[in-house]
Each structure stands twice: as C-alpha cells, then as structure tokens.
Image (cartoon, grey):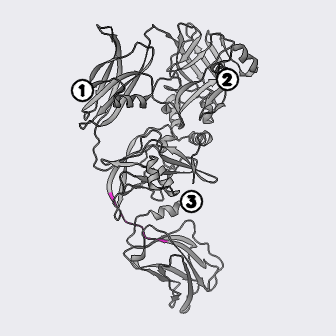
Amino acid sequence: MKIFKSSLLALLAVAAAAMTSCSDDNNYTAGVESDGAYFGESASKIEFSIDETSFPVTVSRTSAQVDATVSITAVDESGLFTVPTSATFNGNELTTTINISYNPDDIEQDVNYPITLSVSPSTEYGYATYSFTAVSPSPWTSIGKCTYTDDFISTFYNVPNTPYQVEIQQNDLTPGLYRLVNPYGKGYPYNEPGDYDTSSDYYMVIDATNPDRVVVERFLSGMDWGEGEFMMWSFAGYYLNRGMSPDDVDAKGYYGTLENGIITWPKGTLFVGLPGDNGYSLYPANNNGAARIVMPGVVLSDYSAQVDYAGRKVDVDENNLLTADVTLGDDVAKARVAAVLGQDIEAIAEGIIDGTIESVEITASGVVELPIDKADGIYTIMVVTYDDSGDVQEFGYDFVEISFSGKQWKEVGSAEILDGWIIPLFDVDPSDYIWYASVEENQETPGIYRIVNMYGGDFVDAGSMLPGIYNIQINAVDKSFVYVQPQQTGLDEGFGNITIADLPGYYVSRGLTQAEIISRLDDEDYSTASVDSDGNLVISINACMTWLSGTPSFIGSSKITIETGDGTAAKSVSRPLSRSSMSASELQWRLGNHAIFNTTRVKRAEKFLNAVAKY
C-alpha cells in the first residue's frame, strides 16, 4: 500500500512555485556502464504549475565525449502534452533536459495525467523507460487553527473524544473546500512517536461547498497503531464514489452539515478502515456522534445542562416528587426538566420536546421538584435546553433507582469478577483481568443477587457503556441450579447493547421447567454455587452466552465470588483491578489506548465487528 499512499498524498500536495519531482523507492541501482542514455528513475509523480507552460524532465548518458542526440518517444493518454522527439547532449554534458509543454487552459487541477517516456539508444546503467503522473495541484491557503474532535479512532479504542487544535486550509479556487493538515500526526492527543509518519504531510479533505451536504473524501491518515495505516472516509463520500446519486445520499441522511461555523456528521455515518489482505475493511465510525470541526474564530455557545438526583419527598397533597439539582450553561434561555421511569434517552428527549412527556420549565439553575408515579424502577432525570429563539440545543441526564415498596435490595459486599462474557472478545485471558463491583441481595427472595453496574466502574472498557444503570442479576436460590437469564449489559461495542445469559438461564427465559432443562444439559453446561472456607459464595457459570448482533455465541466461562463472609473476607470495591503488578489506572490506559494491547483491540474489532464495506 505504500506506493498508493504516496501517490494520493502527492495528489493533495500544496502547489509549488515551480515543478517538483518525487519518487517512491525507485532510485536506480547502477548496472554495468555502457554507452547510451537513461532515466534516473522508473516511476514518480511530477507536480507542475498552472502558471507555467512547461516542465522539465532530466535525461542522462554514460559517455560525455562528443555532442549526441538520442530519440525520445512518448505515450500521453490525455493528448494535452507536447513531448520533444529527441534530447541533445552538448560536449561533456552527462545530463540534459527536455521540456514537456502544455496549454494551461486545457489543464484540470488535481487530475493525474499519466505519461510514459522511452529513450533510444539506452543503457543498462539506468532506466530506458520512465512512467510518471503529472499533476497541477490547486493552491491552498491556511485560514488558521480549527478545533477538531475525533470520532473515527475512538469508535475502536477506549479514548475520550478530546477536542484539539489542527491547522485548516481552504482551497483558493473552490471556496468551501477545506483540508485538515496532519490531523493524526503529532497533535493527536493519543499518539506517541512512531505511531505516525513524519516524512510526509497528510490531508483530510472536506468538501463543504454545499453546507447541507458535507463530504469527507477518502483519507489515508499516516497513523498506524500496529495493524496498518488507518483510512477515514464518510458514508457520503463512499457511496458517491460507488455511483449513488447525491439526492439518494441525502435521503439516507449520510451527509454532514456546516452550520454556524461548525461541521458535524450524523451518528454512525463515518467510516474507519483497517487494511487486510484484500484492501481495506470499512467499519462504521462516529458511533458517539462526537466528530466535529469548529472553524477558526468561532466561539461556542454554552447550552449545556447538568442534573443530579437530590432526593424525593411527598407534598401536602400526597404527590410523589423527585428533586433534582440542575445547572444550566450561560447561554441557555430556558430548559424543560422531567423524571421518567426507564432509560431510553432518545425517546425521553423526544417526549419532552414534543410535549408528550410532562415537564417543568425553568430559566435558571437550581433545585427542581418533579412529579413521578409511584412505581419501583430506574428513573431518568432529563434536562432539555433551548436558546433565545426557542430552538432545542442540548440535554443532560442522571439516573436513580427508586423503590416505593421498601428496601428491596441490600448491599452485601463486593463481587470479584472473572468474566467469560466480554473479556474473551478482546483475545485476553479473563484470569488476567479480574475486577470488583458492589453486589446486592434481594430481600424478598434471598439467593437472588445483582452485580451493580457490572460493566461500568472498574471494568476495563467502561468507556463503551451506554447511559444508564445496568445491573446483572444471578439467581442462586438453588446452589445446584444457578442461572442468569438474558439481560443487557449496557456495553455497546458498535452494534448495540450487548446481551448476556448462561445456557440454563436462556432456557428459563424460554419457559422450560427446571426438570426439562436438566434433561437437556450436560454436566459442563450447569451453573452452580458453593461456599468457600472464608464464607464467600463462589458462583461458577460454565456456558456463557453473548449476543453481539442478534445471534448468541458461547464465549467462555465465568466465576463470580460474592465476598459476604464475616470478618476480613468482605473487601472494598476499590481493590486493584488486576492480579498483575501494574496498577488499575495503568491497565486501563493500556487497554484503552494503544500500548502493548493495541494490536489485540484491533484484532477484536476485526474479529467480531462486521465490516459493512470494502475498498
């Protein structure tokens, strides 16, 4: 892929004041010296200026005793260039030049024109044939530093969507055509020396000539975290390249937009590409919806909202109220606040906006009282903000679990988790990465436990958690017949909320009786529980099932030790994440970034994410 990469970059290079020439690993190796002429390289790209009428090509010879003329033949597919039919050496000259002429009015900028030259008589000392592409790059002018937020790489790696400064240029001939200069070079916050190519400039070209139809052109980043150079593209660019009409691309919602000096793209409409044996596999990116370019000089308004649960009470009319502490951004004109049973963020936001969900309007920060139904469950407290024109801007939320019927769950200690559902997807031995979480027991049915937000908190990939509270319940009422029914983890690795269960729990969810399940299972399929010498409950889950894209797979086995013994057996959930010598924070950094486990995480993506396109 190196030659392809270099030619693309040369195509996008800044126009030079005079012709330049470059080559990719084509420097000749001297052969046996003999009389005749030759070229010093076999292939390259030549950049020429639209302000000139010709550019030179060098021809060399091995003997410089007398004047000599050699023949030049050319193949020019475009027919736009005039190539001399000969080259003349005078006296002791070992090199001479021929000038290839053109009419600037006939030339399209940023178009590759292939030309092949041959010289005769030639010599084995160099190359008898020289094939190159001639291109006149259009000029670009820097317009300053933009603020760029990546959501290509963060789709695959547990790194924050951190804004950073990148030089942005505009095409002198096409207003609205922009390019970012080395956006994944030294300035990318999660790069280290060696992660990116410093020998060339890399340009991400963004066509915003129509601000309602913004396109990211195919972009080779120059960044390699162990599995080859990353490619970036937008759905719009890809499907336009495949022949889809602009209107159809628009109808599918693939375009980005440039509004008020800010470029954004719809969630999931960018591609990140990873190289393989047959080109690049393209995976959906911008899964967080965070990709953004803020143009130089644009000041962002603060329409943010933060909300925190502050308690609940019953008023004099016996209405149940939830109290929330709301903090509004400086530019918020008003906000609507509601508390809703459930965790569907988008549906709740839409309901507040369209009025189908009752909300309280506020114009300043403070404590808000919100009416709620008398129902047990997890509530979402949401704030939607508006500007002076009454347009919706942003929303913030918090979650709280409420039980009106009394304390149904009681914390009983911590759970030591050896996970066989998710960790094996990283091609990592689960025993190397044990973490801890709070565990609660059901007060109405002792023996039913739940691991509180099991894949949040200290889990190594907690950055992939969806908003909400996702507890994992385990039924260990009968220690010889433990089961985990299908339930969502809150983890989203790019294809939705991952569901887990064990095989007995799956059958329970399908309505089979315990006797029917036992008749179907082999001994190795059972999940069981036992009490160890410290009084801790050790749950062994042998047939872990994980739903990634609609079909369950048997991934591995889990062991969850609920540390409920008396004395020193109960441990704090802040214990080290790993059995290894590295600290929890170092381990999370390594898995979440691109140090020793970078290759593993890329292989994970290729292993169980489905590429939606190839190039």
Check disc 3: other Cα within 10 Å, few if <14, some if 14-19, many if 20+.
few
Q: Amino acid at mark 3?
A: Lys
Q: CA distance from mark 1 to mark 3?
A: 57 Å
Residue 277's place in the image compared with 588, above or below, is below
Secondary structure, mark 3, is helix
Magenta residues, as a range?
Answer: 134-142
**Residue 155 numbered tag:** none
Amino acid type at image mark 2: Leu
Of the pair 116 and 570, the residue shown nearer to us: 116
Q: Which residue is at a point 61% across and 72% down the rendered structure image? A: 29
Disc with the residue nearer the chain's start (2 vs 3): 3
State the mark number for residue 2. Answer: 3
Q: In this picture, is 175 found above or below 605?
A: below
> Does residue 191 belong to the magenta stretch?
no
Q: Residues within 10 Å of mark 2 (few under 14, many from 20)?
A: many
Q: On the image, numbered disc 2 is attached to which residue?
A: 503
Give the quadrant of the C terminus.
Answer: bottom right
